[in-house]
Amino acid sequence: MTPIRLSGPGLAIALALASPLLIAAPALANSPLLESVKNNPQRAKALCSELKALNAQGLSYTSPQAVAQIASRQGLSNTDAEILSTYVVGLYCPDVR
């Protein structure tokens, strides 16, 4: 496999697209929000149950209604609820939609 070499505009575009992810990754890596379910699988399983119940009501876990409901139940902002739900689905309940 030949490595891709970027220069000029290609490099600038690649860096512009990747930089927000590179900045956010270290902050999320040690996030107390994510650690709270990583260190407490029971909390993650409970959240999976909530998300499955939302699916049963015809709501995607990413829908504004589902995010608001999770935020309210968990005492989080909508943004944190969306991040937490995505993390939990990815690790604990990939069958949730």
Image: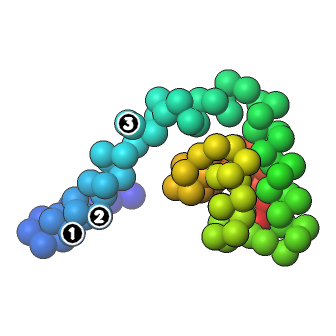
Asked if the residues shown at circle 3 and circle 2 are in contact, with their CB atoms under 8 angstroms apart, the answer is no
Q: Nearer the viewer, mark 3 or mark 2?
A: 3
Numbered tag placed on residue 52 in the rendering? none
Q: Is residue 97 above or below residue 73?
A: below
Q: Residues within 10 Å of mark 1 (few under 14, many from 20)?
A: few
Helix, strand, or loop for circle 3? Answer: helix
Asked if the residues shown at circle 1 and circle 2 are in contact, with their CB atoms under 8 angstroms apart, the answer is yes
Q: Position of residue 30 (x, y in %)?
A: 47, 29
Residue labelled with disc 2: 17
Residue at x-position 86% and y-position 58%: 52
Numbered tag placed on residue 26 in the rendering? 3
Residue at x-position 68% and y-position 52%: 72
Helix, strand, or loop for circle 1? Answer: helix
- Under mark 2, the amino acid is Leu
Residue 38 visible to the viewer: yes
Q: Residues within 10 Å of mark 2 (few under 14, many from 20)?
A: few
Of callouts 1 and 3, the N-terminal one: 1
Residue 59 figure quarter: bottom right
- Under mark 3, the amino acid is Pro
Which colour style is shown? rainbow
Q: Position of residue 19 (x, y in %)?
A: 27, 54
Viewer-side residue, 53 vs 16:
53
Residue at x-position 77% and y-position 34%: 43
Q: Nearer the viewer, mark 1 or mark 3?
A: 3
Spatial CA span between label 1 and label 3: 22 Å
